Amino acid sequence: MRISLNKYKIFSNAKINIGLNVFQKESDGYHNIDSIMAPIDLADEIDVTFYSDLGNLKIECSDKNIPTDERNILYKTYKAFFEESKKEKRKIDIILKKNIPSEAGLGGGSSNAGFFLKLLNEHYGNIYNESELEELAMKIGSDVPFFIKNKTARVGGKGNKVDLVENNLKDSIILIKPLDFGVSTKEAYESFDNLKEVKYANFDKIIECLKDNNRIALENSIENSLEQGILETDINIKMLKITLNSVISGKKFFMSGSGSTYYTFVTELEKSQIETRLKTFVDNVKIIICKTIN
Protein backbone atom coordinates (compact mmCIF):
# COMPACT_ATOMS: atom_id res chain seq x y z
CA MET A 1 0.00 0.00 0.00
CA ARG A 2 1.31 3.44 -0.95
CA ILE A 3 0.90 5.90 1.88
CA SER A 4 1.49 9.51 0.90
CA LEU A 5 3.58 11.43 3.41
CA ASN A 6 3.77 14.87 1.87
CA LYS A 7 2.73 16.74 -1.25
CA TYR A 8 4.53 19.83 -2.52
CA LYS A 9 4.06 22.23 -5.41
CA ILE A 10 7.21 24.06 -6.47
CA PHE A 11 7.80 26.62 -9.20
CA SER A 12 11.06 26.13 -11.02
CA ASN A 13 12.00 29.36 -12.84
CA ALA A 14 14.13 29.95 -15.93
CA LYS A 15 17.22 32.14 -16.33
CA ILE A 16 18.79 34.32 -18.98
CA ASN A 17 22.47 34.92 -19.62
CA ILE A 18 23.31 38.62 -19.64
CA GLY A 19 26.47 37.98 -21.60
CA LEU A 20 28.43 34.75 -21.90
CA ASN A 21 32.17 34.32 -22.34
CA VAL A 22 33.38 30.84 -23.22
CA PHE A 23 37.07 29.97 -23.15
CA GLN A 24 39.06 27.31 -24.96
CA LYS A 25 38.38 23.66 -24.18
CA GLU A 26 40.33 22.26 -21.23
CA SER A 27 42.17 18.92 -21.17
CA ASP A 28 39.10 17.32 -19.53
CA GLY A 29 37.02 18.20 -22.60
CA TYR A 30 35.02 20.94 -20.86
CA HIS A 31 35.08 24.73 -21.25
CA ASN A 32 35.41 27.35 -18.54
CA ILE A 33 32.85 30.14 -18.76
CA ASP A 34 32.18 33.61 -17.39
CA SER A 35 28.59 34.83 -17.37
CA ILE A 36 25.96 36.84 -15.57
CA MET A 37 22.91 34.67 -15.02
CA ALA A 38 19.66 36.24 -13.90
CA PRO A 39 16.54 34.33 -12.80
CA ILE A 40 13.33 35.31 -14.61
CA ASP A 41 9.67 34.88 -13.67
CA LEU A 42 8.90 32.21 -16.28
CA ALA A 43 8.55 28.93 -14.42
CA ASP A 44 7.67 25.25 -14.70
CA GLU A 45 5.25 23.79 -12.16
CA ILE A 46 6.37 20.65 -10.33
CA ASP A 47 3.99 18.63 -8.14
CA VAL A 48 5.94 16.22 -5.93
CA THR A 49 4.43 13.47 -3.78
CA PHE A 50 6.58 11.60 -1.24
CA TYR A 51 5.52 8.11 -0.09
CA SER A 52 6.49 6.16 3.00
CA ASP A 53 7.38 2.93 1.20
CA LEU A 54 10.65 2.12 -0.52
CA GLY A 55 10.76 2.47 -4.27
CA ASN A 56 11.76 4.70 -7.14
CA LEU A 57 10.93 7.91 -8.95
CA LYS A 58 8.01 8.20 -11.37
CA ILE A 59 7.71 11.21 -13.67
CA GLU A 60 4.78 12.48 -15.74
CA CYS A 61 5.39 15.44 -18.05
CA SER A 62 3.07 17.73 -20.01
CA ASP A 63 5.62 17.90 -22.85
CA LYS A 64 5.61 14.51 -24.55
CA ASN A 65 8.95 15.26 -26.24
CA ILE A 66 10.72 15.21 -22.87
CA PRO A 67 11.75 11.73 -21.68
CA THR A 68 10.34 10.61 -18.34
CA ASP A 69 12.76 7.73 -17.78
CA GLU A 70 16.38 7.71 -16.56
CA ARG A 71 17.32 10.24 -19.26
CA ASN A 72 15.41 12.97 -17.42
CA ILE A 73 17.62 15.22 -15.26
CA LEU A 74 15.17 14.74 -12.36
CA TYR A 75 16.20 11.07 -12.28
CA LYS A 76 19.83 12.09 -12.17
CA THR A 77 19.01 14.43 -9.27
CA TYR A 78 17.07 11.74 -7.40
CA LYS A 79 19.91 9.24 -7.85
CA ALA A 80 22.64 11.72 -6.83
CA PHE A 81 20.82 12.80 -3.67
CA PHE A 82 20.14 9.29 -2.36
CA GLU A 83 23.59 7.97 -3.25
CA GLU A 84 25.30 10.92 -1.57
CA SER A 85 23.07 10.96 1.53
CA LYS A 86 23.11 7.15 1.91
CA LYS A 87 19.38 7.25 2.61
CA GLU A 88 17.07 4.50 1.38
CA LYS A 89 15.27 5.40 -1.83
CA ARG A 90 11.60 6.16 -1.28
CA LYS A 91 8.81 6.27 -3.83
CA ILE A 92 8.33 9.75 -5.23
CA ASP A 93 5.85 10.83 -7.91
CA ILE A 94 6.45 13.95 -9.97
CA ILE A 95 4.02 15.71 -12.30
CA LEU A 96 5.96 18.24 -14.37
CA LYS A 97 4.10 20.98 -16.23
CA LYS A 98 6.55 22.56 -18.66
CA ASN A 99 6.25 26.28 -19.36
CA ILE A 100 9.97 26.82 -20.06
CA PRO A 101 10.82 25.82 -23.65
CA SER A 102 13.44 23.13 -24.27
CA GLU A 103 16.68 23.70 -26.23
CA ALA A 104 16.16 27.37 -25.51
CA GLY A 105 19.17 28.45 -23.44
CA LEU A 106 16.85 29.24 -20.53
CA GLY A 107 18.04 26.52 -18.15
CA GLY A 108 14.72 24.70 -17.84
CA GLY A 109 16.14 21.26 -17.07
CA SER A 110 18.84 22.63 -14.78
CA SER A 111 16.22 24.64 -12.91
CA ASN A 112 14.02 21.55 -12.45
CA ALA A 113 17.05 19.72 -11.04
CA GLY A 114 18.09 22.55 -8.71
CA PHE A 115 14.64 23.07 -7.24
CA PHE A 116 14.00 19.33 -6.84
CA LEU A 117 17.37 18.94 -5.12
CA LYS A 118 16.51 21.74 -2.68
CA LEU A 119 13.14 20.11 -1.98
CA LEU A 120 14.73 16.71 -1.33
CA ASN A 121 17.17 18.32 1.08
CA GLU A 122 14.39 20.17 2.89
CA HIS A 123 12.12 17.11 3.07
CA TYR A 124 14.87 15.04 4.64
CA GLY A 125 15.74 17.59 7.32
CA ASN A 126 18.24 19.89 5.58
CA ILE A 127 21.10 17.41 5.49
CA TYR A 128 23.26 19.79 3.46
CA ASN A 129 24.01 23.49 3.82
CA GLU A 130 23.92 25.75 0.76
CA SER A 131 27.56 25.32 -0.26
CA GLU A 132 27.31 21.52 0.11
CA LEU A 133 24.16 21.55 -2.03
CA GLU A 134 26.02 23.52 -4.71
CA GLU A 135 28.77 20.88 -4.72
CA LEU A 136 26.18 18.13 -5.14
CA ALA A 137 24.40 20.17 -7.83
CA MET A 138 27.63 20.38 -9.83
CA LYS A 139 27.60 16.59 -10.16
CA ILE A 140 24.18 16.83 -11.82
CA GLY A 141 24.86 19.60 -14.35
CA SER A 142 26.96 22.71 -14.86
CA ASP A 143 24.03 25.18 -14.63
CA VAL A 144 22.39 23.49 -11.64
CA PRO A 145 24.51 25.20 -8.89
CA PHE A 146 23.19 28.61 -10.02
CA PHE A 147 19.63 27.58 -9.16
CA ILE A 148 20.55 26.72 -5.57
CA LYS A 149 20.90 30.43 -4.76
CA ASN A 150 18.59 31.42 -7.66
CA LYS A 151 19.68 35.07 -7.61
CA THR A 152 21.49 37.19 -10.19
CA ALA A 153 25.09 36.03 -10.09
CA ARG A 154 28.38 35.98 -11.91
CA VAL A 155 28.96 32.34 -12.76
CA GLY A 156 32.45 31.08 -13.57
CA GLY A 157 34.65 28.03 -13.89
CA LYS A 158 32.56 25.16 -15.20
CA GLY A 159 29.50 26.56 -13.41
CA ASN A 160 30.82 25.88 -9.92
CA LYS A 161 31.68 29.50 -9.05
CA VAL A 162 28.52 31.47 -8.19
CA ASP A 163 28.99 35.00 -6.84
CA LEU A 164 25.92 37.17 -6.28
CA VAL A 165 25.71 40.59 -7.94
CA GLU A 166 23.29 43.46 -7.38
CA ASN A 167 20.56 43.70 -10.03
CA ASN A 168 18.38 46.81 -10.08
CA LEU A 169 17.20 46.40 -13.67
CA LYS A 170 13.64 47.69 -13.98
CA ASP A 171 12.87 46.91 -17.64
CA SER A 172 10.80 43.98 -18.82
CA ILE A 173 12.22 41.33 -21.12
CA ILE A 174 10.67 39.88 -24.27
CA LEU A 175 11.76 36.33 -25.08
CA ILE A 176 11.59 35.12 -28.68
CA LYS A 177 11.74 31.32 -28.97
CA PRO A 178 11.56 29.69 -32.43
CA LEU A 179 8.95 26.93 -32.53
CA ASP A 180 10.31 24.77 -35.34
CA PHE A 181 13.96 24.43 -34.34
CA GLY A 182 16.29 24.52 -31.35
CA VAL A 183 20.00 24.47 -30.66
CA SER A 184 21.61 21.66 -28.71
CA THR A 185 24.33 22.58 -26.23
CA LYS A 186 26.66 20.12 -27.99
CA GLU A 187 26.10 21.85 -31.34
CA ALA A 188 26.69 25.28 -29.79
CA TYR A 189 30.04 24.33 -28.24
CA GLU A 190 31.22 22.55 -31.39
CA SER A 191 30.48 25.71 -33.40
CA PHE A 192 32.36 27.81 -30.85
CA ASP A 193 35.40 25.53 -31.03
CA ASN A 194 35.72 26.30 -34.75
CA LEU A 195 35.72 30.10 -34.32
CA LYS A 196 38.91 31.88 -35.33
CA GLU A 197 38.15 35.04 -33.33
CA VAL A 198 35.88 35.69 -30.34
CA LYS A 199 34.41 38.95 -28.97
CA TYR A 200 34.12 38.92 -25.19
CA ALA A 201 31.61 40.62 -22.91
CA ASN A 202 32.82 43.21 -20.39
CA PHE A 203 31.44 41.84 -17.13
CA ASP A 204 32.87 44.53 -14.88
CA LYS A 205 30.86 47.02 -16.95
CA ILE A 206 27.77 44.77 -17.01
CA ILE A 207 27.81 44.45 -13.20
CA GLU A 208 28.08 48.23 -12.86
CA CYS A 209 25.17 48.73 -15.30
CA LEU A 210 22.93 46.24 -13.48
CA LYS A 211 23.60 48.02 -10.20
CA ASP A 212 22.88 51.45 -11.73
CA ASN A 213 19.91 50.29 -13.88
CA ASN A 214 21.73 51.66 -16.95
CA ARG A 215 20.19 49.66 -19.77
CA ILE A 216 21.80 51.49 -22.70
CA ALA A 217 25.35 50.97 -21.45
CA LEU A 218 24.42 47.41 -20.45
CA GLU A 219 23.34 46.54 -23.98
CA ASN A 220 26.60 47.87 -25.39
CA SER A 221 28.61 45.53 -23.13
CA ILE A 222 26.87 42.20 -23.82
CA GLU A 223 28.46 39.52 -26.01
CA ASN A 224 27.76 35.79 -26.26
CA SER A 225 30.62 33.53 -27.38
CA LEU A 226 28.30 30.64 -28.24
CA GLU A 227 26.04 32.82 -30.38
CA GLN A 228 29.05 33.91 -32.41
CA GLY A 229 29.77 30.29 -33.28
CA ILE A 230 26.13 29.37 -33.95
CA LEU A 231 25.67 32.31 -36.35
CA GLU A 232 28.52 30.86 -38.42
CA THR A 233 26.97 27.40 -38.74
CA ASP A 234 23.18 27.56 -38.23
CA ILE A 235 21.23 29.24 -41.05
CA ASN A 236 17.97 29.16 -39.04
CA ILE A 237 19.49 31.17 -36.20
CA LYS A 238 21.16 33.55 -38.63
CA MET A 239 17.87 34.24 -40.45
CA LEU A 240 16.03 34.73 -37.14
CA LYS A 241 18.58 37.32 -36.00
CA ILE A 242 18.36 39.15 -39.35
CA THR A 243 14.55 39.13 -39.16
CA LEU A 244 14.48 40.48 -35.60
CA ASN A 245 16.86 43.31 -36.47
CA SER A 246 14.82 44.28 -39.53
CA VAL A 247 11.40 44.12 -37.82
CA ILE A 248 12.45 46.16 -34.77
CA SER A 249 15.13 48.55 -35.96
CA GLY A 250 17.18 50.18 -33.23
CA LYS A 251 16.60 47.36 -30.71
CA LYS A 252 19.30 44.93 -29.66
CA PHE A 253 18.59 41.22 -29.41
CA PHE A 254 20.72 38.86 -27.34
CA MET A 255 20.94 35.08 -27.30
CA SER A 256 20.53 33.42 -23.91
CA GLY A 257 23.03 30.65 -23.20
CA SER A 258 23.39 28.27 -26.12
CA GLY A 259 20.10 29.40 -27.67
CA SER A 260 17.82 29.21 -29.51
CA THR A 261 16.00 31.92 -27.53
CA TYR A 262 16.68 35.60 -28.15
CA TYR A 263 15.63 38.36 -25.80
CA THR A 264 15.42 42.13 -25.75
CA PHE A 265 14.96 44.64 -22.92
CA VAL A 266 11.84 46.85 -23.15
CA THR A 267 10.37 49.71 -21.14
CA GLU A 268 6.73 49.65 -20.07
CA LEU A 269 5.95 52.28 -22.73
CA GLU A 270 7.41 50.29 -25.65
CA LYS A 271 6.55 46.78 -24.45
CA SER A 272 3.11 46.46 -26.07
CA GLN A 273 4.14 47.95 -29.42
CA ILE A 274 7.22 45.73 -29.75
CA GLU A 275 5.28 42.63 -28.71
CA THR A 276 2.66 43.36 -31.40
CA ARG A 277 5.26 43.89 -34.12
CA LEU A 278 7.05 40.67 -33.24
CA LYS A 279 3.81 38.67 -33.25
CA THR A 280 2.78 40.24 -36.57
CA PHE A 281 6.00 40.04 -38.56
CA VAL A 282 8.05 37.15 -37.11
CA ASP A 283 6.70 33.71 -38.02
CA ASN A 284 6.84 30.49 -36.01
CA VAL A 285 8.06 31.95 -32.74
CA LYS A 286 6.71 32.02 -29.21
CA ILE A 287 6.73 35.45 -27.57
CA ILE A 288 6.98 35.56 -23.77
CA ILE A 289 7.11 38.70 -21.62
CA CYS A 290 8.88 38.39 -18.29
CA LYS A 291 11.10 40.18 -15.79
CA THR A 292 14.20 39.30 -13.86
CA ILE A 293 13.64 38.21 -10.26
CA ASN A 294 15.73 40.61 -8.19
Image (spheres, rainbow, N blue to C red):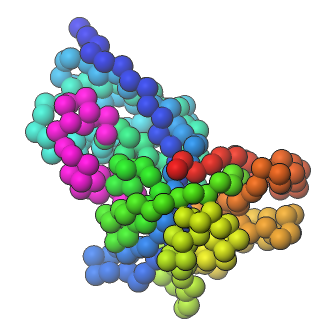
Question: Is residue 122 part of the magenta span, yes or no?
Answer: yes
Is 146 situated above or below 88? Answer: below
- Residue at the left extreme? 86
Kindly report the secondary structure that dominates the magenta region of the rendered protein.
helix
Q: Residue at x 32, y 34 (%)?
A: 119
Q: Is residue 127 left or right of residue 270?
A: left
Question: Is residue 203 part of the magenta span, yes or no?
Answer: no
- Residue at the bottom extreme? 196
Comparing 211 with 50, the one in front is: 211
Residue range in magenta is: 118-143
Q: Residue at x 31, y 18 (%)?
A: 6
- Point out residue 158 in the picture as x, y percentages from the top left corner: 34, 68
Q: Is residue 195 left or right of residue 273?
A: left
- Point out residue 276 in the picture as x, y percentages from the top left corner: 86, 48
Locate residue 50: give its quadrant.
top left
- Residue at the front extreme? 212
Locate residue 7: give its quadrant.
top left
Q: Is residue 236 left or right of residue 72?
A: right
Q: Residue at x 54, y 48 (%)?
A: 293
Q: Residue at x 58, y 51 (%)?
A: 292
Locate residue 250: give its quadrant.
bottom right
Comparing 142 with 41, the one in front is: 41
Is 96 situated above or below 278? Answer: above
- Residue at the top extreme? 1
Count of marks placed on residues: 0
- Point out residue 86 in the picture as x, y percentages from the top left corner: 10, 39
- Point out residue 147 in the picture as x, y percentages from the top left corner: 40, 50
Q: Is residue 105 left or right of residue 121?
A: right
Asked whether the viewer can see residue 122, the reply is: yes
Asked whether the viewer can see residue 284, the reply is: no
